[in-house]
Image (cartoon, rainbow, N blue to C red):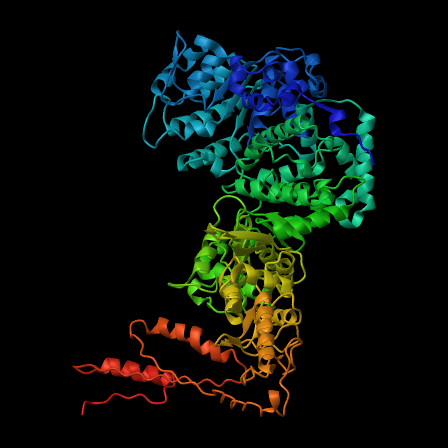
Amino acid sequence: MNLKPWREIAVPHEDVLKGTFAQAEFAADISRVHAGTATPEYQDPALFFQRTFITEGMRLLLDSVVKRLSGRGGDPVIQLQTAFGGGKTHTMLAVYHLASAKAPASDMPGVSAILDAAGVAELPHARIAVLDGIKSSPNQPVDHNVVTVRTLWGDLAWQLGGAEGYALVADADASGTSPGKAVLETLLARYAPCVILIDELVAYVRQFEEGKALTGGTFDSNLSFIQALTEALKAVPTAVLLASLPESDKEAGSQRGVKALAALAHYFGRVQALWKPVATEEAFEIVRRRLFSQIGDRLAAESVCRAFADYYVAHKDDLPRETQEGRYYERLLHAYPIHPEVFDRLYEDWSSLDNFQRTRGVLKLMAKVIHRLWKDDNKDPLIMPGSLPVYDADTRNDIIYYLPQGWDPVLERDVDGERAETTGIENQDTRLGSVQACRRTARAIFLGSAPSTANQVVRGLELERVVLGVAIPGQQLGVYKDALRRLGDRLHYLNSGGNRFWFDTRPNLRREMEDRKRRFQDKEDVFPAIQDRVRKSLATGMFTGIHVFTGSGDVPDDWALRLVVLAPDAGFSRSGTNLAVDRANEILKNRGEAPRQKQNRLIFMAADYDNVSRLRDQVRSMLAWQSIVSDGREGKLNLDGIQTKQAQKGLDDANDALRRMVRETYKWLLAPVQEARPGKGLSDVQWEHFPLNPGAANASQEIERVMRENELLITEWAPIHLATMLRQWFWKEDQPEANALDVWQKTCQYLYLPRLKDDQVFQLTVGAGVESQDFFAVAQGKADGRYLGIVYGKRSTIIMDASLLLIAPPAALAYAEKLRDEEEAARKPESPPIPGPGGLTTGTGSPAPWVEEPKPGNGPGGTPPAPTPPAATPKRRFFGSIDLDPTLAKKQFADIVDEVVQQFTAKHGVKVRISIELEAEAPVGFDDGVQRAVNENCKVLRFNSAEFESEQ
């Protein structure tokens, strides 16, 4: 539905468009008009009445004044005691211009009708006296050249009759005493018809201290003057007095002000006629006439109002009942282009604030709102609560001026602006952003709830009124309801209960969570929580051990493949300072204080430096929600049912977000590498980094994928690669064989060698390679220049032990040739018997292709065969002993385990027994403390025997 925007129908006044309305409003001062220094819209009677809507209360008041000045009745004293900003000054200005007769009635819209109703053809010119309690000073006389005026009665006489009038009260003015009723009757009668306008009288009288006389008289003399004046006015049929008094004690100020108000209200109450304040419906026309110069297209305005009225009827279940009445269409028309809900909230809610002026406050606020919306090319069909531009600094400052301290962060963070949560939600969700659903909803709730207080039994704006303040014909109401649900989850100061919503300067449960987040420290709370989540997200898989946030001393230096996860304070960055590399280097090079030997068994996982702060914050959020839920269950925190559900939902959401955040943060795999350069030695340790996919279903499987694809880990190795490595690093011209176990262990130690998953991969590669004559041969040792159990080009069962040798193909072929030569020589008759070499056999005892196996029976030449040497008895047991240095025992014992014990434990079926004998002597004996500690520790460590002895 295409509705014409308000800006194309209603045209604001020039001062509103230019943003100068506020200055003009502050110039609305009765004393400045009396002095002729006010702005034209207040100084010129015709302009003033053109912009003034004569309300029912003002019409009745002006009718009374006209009758009084014409001698046809009317009230002699009219008290304007209304709420702050109730239109008192504007009403006094209307009386002033009416009585001054500086413009004909025909030039002042609405005045002719008042004169006709009063039966007066032409209003006689009246003398006017303006007594301004703010402008006058009780102790500072005013010099008028001819006379010096000291008191209110002196000023009144001077304004009505000049020097001649002042002479009537000269003595009373000089002495500071009230002139009395008779003198005042004479003064008023002589200069009638006359109008006396007294503004801010309480502000003047409260300056007099009890028992202290000033040039302006005393507290009592001024009260006596007011009493005498009100009585004198009854006796002069063409004189009238209008006086403004504050409505509340708070506006009266000090204790003397409250006392002065009570006394003045008493004296005025004896003869006054109360003035009827502005009604809300009349405020529509007042504001519209003051802020808008014209409604250009009346039919278009009616079309817009009809569309809204029909829209409300169509959605009757979601809107207030009053919108279903036929007169709501009339309200829309009267208020156009401002939505009636704006007026209702301002006049019903905001006018309850002590310092919010009922009429001028609304005018001033709406002038700024209209100016900003016009400047921003607002296209709404009506100016609604949801249109309020609180993103604008001027508008925001004007609004929060009337509210208690603490509202600025509410508006900035929760309601409107570039940094507000509402803007962030709309940027993420185009469905909500297309109609500014979040911002409009938050503005409407703010306008309807900000003036409320925590002491109210019922707080907040009903859902139906929120919808009324934001929805435009043609839009789906569900969009705003969805926005409200999102706001409830995200905003800090938004509260809800009983289908009502309100903002408060006190944070809601979400803010309680934010406050609690500050309690948690990185090392004591945050890092352990991250450690637990990372540990749970990783399975060992191809790694023998996963060490999460572990110090270098606690990462074993052994042959097993290990993943080391670095703590969050060592984040990885592809640019700038790299804390992850520094920390990984430290663990790579050392195990505690000892150098690390098996450096090629470590892979590192690091957090993304840019995401670490977000991860920490998310952990704190989770911990905060967790503490709130826990405190609620234990009764330490008073939570109602809604808050309990909110807390649990907050915890669940925080846990879900944390799971995602851990994966998004720990997304770097770091692998140390070194390059061996011929003739130049080894390069420095370099660190290769590889990103992990946070969206992968399984974190451990993703790590394995990245390691395989980037050859960080070899799980299947071709024999050709092993042969190449042996030729490059192990086989020498004078030593064409290498110890297989040593080769495997060096791949675990040196970063320039391949990183194998485990010794099984190495063993399988050796087994596959020995089947071919292209790669290497194997033997179970070498003694006296002979290879024991050599296998070359045949399948064999490989046993990885300290005796297994990997032999270069040329050496294996040469050794085979040597065996053949020896066998040929042994077959010749002249040759002496030569003990058979035992033959070059396969691992299963089959003869090698090129080796001839010795035949049984007679030897060459018919001689009996040489006796076979008896087979060597296998060595089945090992004993060893060593003395350790007591100060270096820990390191020495670790070396013994690594270099000796593991040689046995690595063999299948080997039983190893280690026994420790410990002997200590002290010339002076051991004290009780040492004996007790040693005995207890030996008991815990399960010593077979442990005792202290006395020297025999």
Figure quadrant of the C terminus: bottom left
User: Which quadrant of the view contains residue 89?
Assistant: top right
Query: x%, y% of residue 692?
Result: 62, 55
Q: Which of 786 and 201 is in front in this view?
A: 786
Numbered-mark total: 0
**Which residue shows up at 48% across the image and 13% down it?**
159
Q: Where is residue 494 in the image (x, y as percent from the top left)?
A: 60, 49
Q: Vertical placement of 576 versus 747: above or below?
A: above
Task: Say if 898 sits above or below 591 in the image.
Answer: below
Q: Is residue 691 above or below residue 875?
A: above
Q: Which residue is drawn at 25% across and 87% down?
A: 948
Q: Looking at the picture, how far across and down is residue 313, in whole percent?
A: 82, 44
Residue 785 visible in the current orientation: yes
Q: Relative to 309, is 931 on the left or the right?
A: left
Q: Which of 395 and 902 lies nearest the eye of the viewer?
A: 902
Q: Position of residue 822 (x, y in %)?
A: 57, 77
Q: From this viewpoint, which residue is outermost toward the top? A: 146
Residue occupying the point 68% across, 36% down: 387
| Front one among 218 and 901 | 901
Q: Is residue 326 visible to the viewer in this orientation of the structure?
A: no
Front in this rendered view, residue 106 or 897: 897
Q: Is residue 309 left or right of residue 165?
A: right
